[in-house]
Image (tube, grey):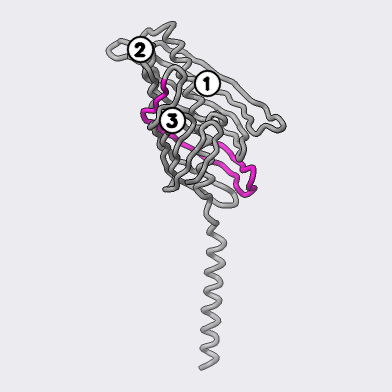
C-alpha cells in the first residue's frame, strides 16, 4: 500500500512540473506597461518628434495662405514638407521628416464654407531623450475656421502612425507599434496656433516586442493649453510635455 501511494504521489509531482513547464513555454511576461505605451503615444503628437501637432501647423498655414489667394469652391492643391535636425553631439533631439498633403476647399450649396479637407502621407525617424523610432503614416482631417473673420481653427479627423521603436535606457524595450488617434473639435487659436485648453483626442495603440509579447491599449488625451496635456491610458494618468514628448506619471 505504501509503495502504491508513493507512485501516486510522484505522479502528481510530475504532472504539476509538466503543467508548469508548459505554461512557462507558452506564456510571456506582460508585454509592456502603460509607461512605455505612453511614450509612444506622446511621440505621436509632440512637436519634437514630428507628431500630429506639426501636421496641424502645416495644414493651417497652407490652408490660410491659399484662401487669401483663391477661395473658389472646390479648389484643390497639393503641398509637401521636408525637414530635419541632424544628430549633434550634446543635443538630445534629432529627426528627419517628409510629408505630402492634398487639400480641397469644402462647399455648402456651391459656396465655400471656410473649411478644407486634407489627406496626407508621411514618414520619418526621430531620437529624443528616451526613445528612438522610425515610422510612417497617414491622416485625414477637416479644418474649419479658415478666413480672417474667424479667431480659431477647429480640426476633426484621424491620425495614424506605425513603425519600429527602441528605448535608449532599456534594451528589452523595442519592437513595432501602431497608433491611431482621433481628434474631436481640436482648437488652435489664431494667429499663433495656440492650443485651446479642453481640446480632446482618443486613441488606440497596439504592437509587439520580441522579448515581451504583444500589447493593446486604448486611452484619451485632454489638451490643457500651451505645451501641456493629460494622457490617460488603461486607467493610468500622465502629464505630457508636447514640446519634448516627455511624461510624468500621476
Q: Earlier along the polypeptide chain: callout 1 or callout 3?
A: 1
Could you tell me residue 22's position as x and y percent?
A: 54, 65
Distance from Cα at disc 1 to Cα at disc 3 = 28 Å
Q: Earlier along the polypeptide chain: callout 2 or callout 1?
A: 1
In the image, residue 171 lies in the stretch drawn in magenta: yes
Using a 10 Å C-alpha cutoff, classify the residue at mark 1 as few (fewer than 14 neighbours), some (14 to 19) or many (20 or more).
some
Of residue 148 and residue 53, the one placed in the foreground of this image is: 148
Q: Which mark is residue 244?
A: none
Q: Point out the residue furthest to the top here.
A: 69
Relative to 215, residue 147 above or below: above
Q: Which mark is residue 225?
A: 3
Q: Is residue 131 left or right of residue 207?
A: right
Give, as a single range, the part of the protein colored magenta. Answer: 162-189
Q: Which mark is residue 149?
A: 2
Could you tell me residue 69's position as x and y percent?
A: 44, 6
Of residue 167 and residue 106, the one placed in the foreground of this image is: 167
Q: Point out the residue furthest to the bottom here.
A: 1
Residue 148 lies in quadrant = top left
Q: Is residue 127 left or right of residue 42?
A: right
Q: How many marks?
A: 3
Q: Residue at x 56, y 36 (%)?
A: 163
Decide: marks 3, 2 in contact (CB < 8 A)?
Answer: no
Residue 200 lies in quadrant = top left
Secondary structure state at the residue bearing disc 2: loop
Q: Residue at x 52, y 89 (%)?
A: 4
Which of labels 3 and 2 is toward the front? 3
Q: Which residue was labeled with disc 1?
A: 100
Could you tell me residue 199's position as x and y percent?
A: 39, 31
Of residue 36 and residue 198, the one placed in the foreground of this image is: 198
Amino acid at each position: 500500500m505504501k509503495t502504491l501511494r508513493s507512485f501516486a504521489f510522484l505522479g502528481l509531482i510530475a504532472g504539476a512540473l509538466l503543467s508548469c513547464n508548459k505554461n512557462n513555454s507558452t506564456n510571456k511576461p506582460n508585454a509592456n506597461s502603460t509607461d512605455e505605451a505612453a511614450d509612444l503615444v506622446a511621440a505621436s503628437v509632440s512637436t519634437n518628434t514630428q507628431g500630429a501637432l506639426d501636421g496641424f501647423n502645416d495644414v493651417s498655414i497652407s490652408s490660410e495662405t491659399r484662401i487669401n489667394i483663391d477661395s473658389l469652391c472646390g479648389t484643390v492643391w497639393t503641398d509637401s514638407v521636408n525637414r530635419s535636425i541632424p544628430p549633434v553631439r550634446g543635443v538630445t533631439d534629432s529627426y528627419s521628416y517628409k510629408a505630402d498633403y492634398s487639400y480641397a476647399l469644402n462647399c455648402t450649396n456651391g459656396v465655400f464654407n471656410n473649411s478644407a479637407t486634407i489627406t496626407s502621407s508621411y514618414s520619418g525617424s526621430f531620437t529624443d531623450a528616451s526613445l528612438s523610432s522610425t515610422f510612417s503614416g497617414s491622416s485625414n482631417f477637416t479644418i474649419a475656421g479658415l478666413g480672417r473673420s474667424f479667431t480659431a481653427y477647429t480640426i476633426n479627423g484621424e491620425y495614424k502612425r506605425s513603425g519600429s521603436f527602441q528605448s535608449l535606457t532599456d534594451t528589452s524595450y523595442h519592437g513595432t507599434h501602431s497608433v491611431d488617434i482621433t481628434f474631436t473639435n481640436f482648437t488652435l487659436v489664431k494667429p499663433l496656433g495656440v492650443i485651446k485648453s479642453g481640446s480632446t483626442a482618443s486613441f488606440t495603440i497596439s504592437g509587439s516586442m520580441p522579448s515581451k509579447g504583444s500589447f493593446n491599449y486604448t486611452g484619451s488625451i485632454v489638451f490643457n493649453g500651451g505645451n501641456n496635456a493629460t494622457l490617460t491610458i488603461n486607467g493610468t494618468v500622465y502629464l505630457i510635455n508636447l514640446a519634448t514628448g516627455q511624461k510624468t506619471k500621476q
